[in-house]
Image (cartoon, helix red, strand yellow):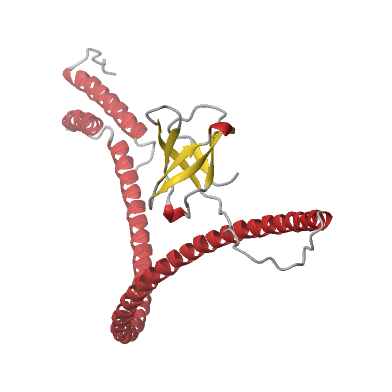
């Protein structure tokens, strides 16, 4: 059994940033839909 | 290999997540309030549509009203034309009547001139008649005055007649008394008298002009204002008096036409003679 490397890499940071960006995007999307009354048309 | 795919996917995930975040942010940023604007625009469009509809309805109503007005005005125009025609007919009749009236006016004016001439002639005639009436009225007044004068004279003469009748009665009584006296004296009153008859003495009044005594102052002579023209003769006796007082008798010695001279009978003297005393043949 090989030992797992547990140190965070740059890709973990990128994953964390992308997750943050996704959360921010979803927040803007929700706020936009709120402005339109949750109606897409 | 697996590691490369994982890394690639992680990178893609990062890229897409960033793109999603940017797109969502952009949409939220630039399209915020589009709904309000859209509703506002929609409301404006609805309001404009309603105003357009109202405007169209109003125009339709105005058009209908205008058509009705045009029809009404056409009817009024036709009525006015009919009235104008009637007025033209009336005007012709009025002109005809005016011509007739002018003709009658000329006729009346001619009659008026004739009537004025006749009135002038009547006025002249009236003035002449007034003058004639005035003259006749003056004659009437003169006649009335003359009639009153004659009535006065008549009354005076009637009074004299009454007085004469009374005197006649007195004289008849006196004649009767004298006849009785003559009969008492033994004479016949019906016997015819033969001889001169003294003239009847008429009553004549005069006045003393002058009195003067003679040189011996034994006689007084008096000049009086009556003479031969008043039937005064010599030897006639006259009476001298002043007011109601008897003065004396005089006997005429000289007679002239308008005066005479008399001698005072001293036995009858009752006072002095003055100028202006009255003289009479009998009282």
**Residue B9 shows in the view:** no
- Provide residue B71's location: percent of width, then percent of height: 37, 75
Q: Nearer the viewer, residue B81 or B259?
A: B259
- Provide residue B175's location: percent of width, then percent of height: 75, 58
- Provide residue A16's location: percent of width, then percent of height: 24, 20
User: Image quarter for residue A30?
Assistant: top left
In this picture, residue B143 sits left or right of residue B114:
right
**Point 38% across, 73% down: residue:** B126
The quadrant in which the N terminus of chain B is found is top left
In this picture, residue A5 sits left or right of residue B35:
left
- Provide residue A32's location: percent of width, then percent of height: 31, 32
**Residue B39 shows in the view:** yes
The quadrant in which the C terminus of chain B is found is top right
**Point 61% across, 59% down: residue:** B157
Q: Nearer the viewer, residue A25 or A40?
A: A40
**Point 18% across, 16% down: residue:** A9
**Point 28% across, 38% down: residue:** B37
Callout count: 0
Q: Is residue B64 above or below residue B179?
A: below
User: Image quarter for residue A36?
Assistant: top left
Q: Nearer the viewer, residue B240 or B108?
A: B240
Q: Is residue B50 above or below residue B122?
A: above
In this picture, residue B107 sits left or right of residue B245:
left
């Amino acid at each position: 059994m090989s030992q797992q490397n547990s140190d965070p890499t740059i890709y973990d940071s990128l994953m964390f940033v992308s997750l943050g960006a996704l959360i921010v995007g979803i927040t803007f999307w929700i706020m936009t839909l709120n402005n339109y009354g949750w109606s897409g048309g | 290999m697996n590691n490369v795919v994982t890394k690639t996917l992680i990178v893609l995930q990062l890229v897409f997540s960033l793109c999603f975040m940017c797109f969502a942010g952009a949409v939220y940023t630039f399209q915020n309030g589009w709904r309000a604007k859209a509703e506002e625009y929609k409301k404006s469009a609805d309001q404009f549509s309603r105003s357009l509809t109202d405007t169209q309805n109003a125009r339709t109503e105005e058009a209908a009203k205008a058509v009705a007005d045009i029809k009404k005005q056409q009817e009024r125009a036709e009525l006015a034309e009919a009235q104008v025609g009637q007025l033209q007919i009336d005007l012709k009749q009025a002109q005809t009547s005016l011509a007739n009236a002018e003709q009658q006016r000329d006729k009346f004016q001619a009659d008026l001139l004739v009537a004025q001439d006749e009135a002038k002639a009547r006025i002249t005639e009236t003035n002449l008649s007034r003058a004639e009436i005035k003259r006749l009225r003056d004659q009437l007044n003169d006649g009335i005055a003359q009639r009153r004068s004659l009535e006065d004279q008549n009354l005076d003469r009637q009074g004299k007649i009454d007085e004469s009748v009374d005197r006649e009665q007195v004289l008849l009584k006196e004649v009767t008394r004298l006849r009785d006296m003559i009969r008492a004296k033994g004479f016949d009153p019906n016997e015819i008298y033969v001889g001169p008859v003294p003239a009847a003495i008429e009553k004549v009044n005069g006045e003393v002009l002058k009195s003067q005594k003679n040189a011996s102052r034994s006689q007084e002579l008096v000049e009086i204002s009556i003479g031969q023209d008043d039937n005064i003769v010599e030897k006639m006796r006259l009476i001298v008096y002043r007011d109601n007082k008897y003065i004396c008798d005089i006997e005429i010695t000289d007679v002239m036409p308008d005066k005479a001279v008399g001698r005072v009978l001293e036995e009858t003297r009752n006072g002095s003679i003055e100028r202006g005393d009255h003289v009479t043949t009998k009282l």
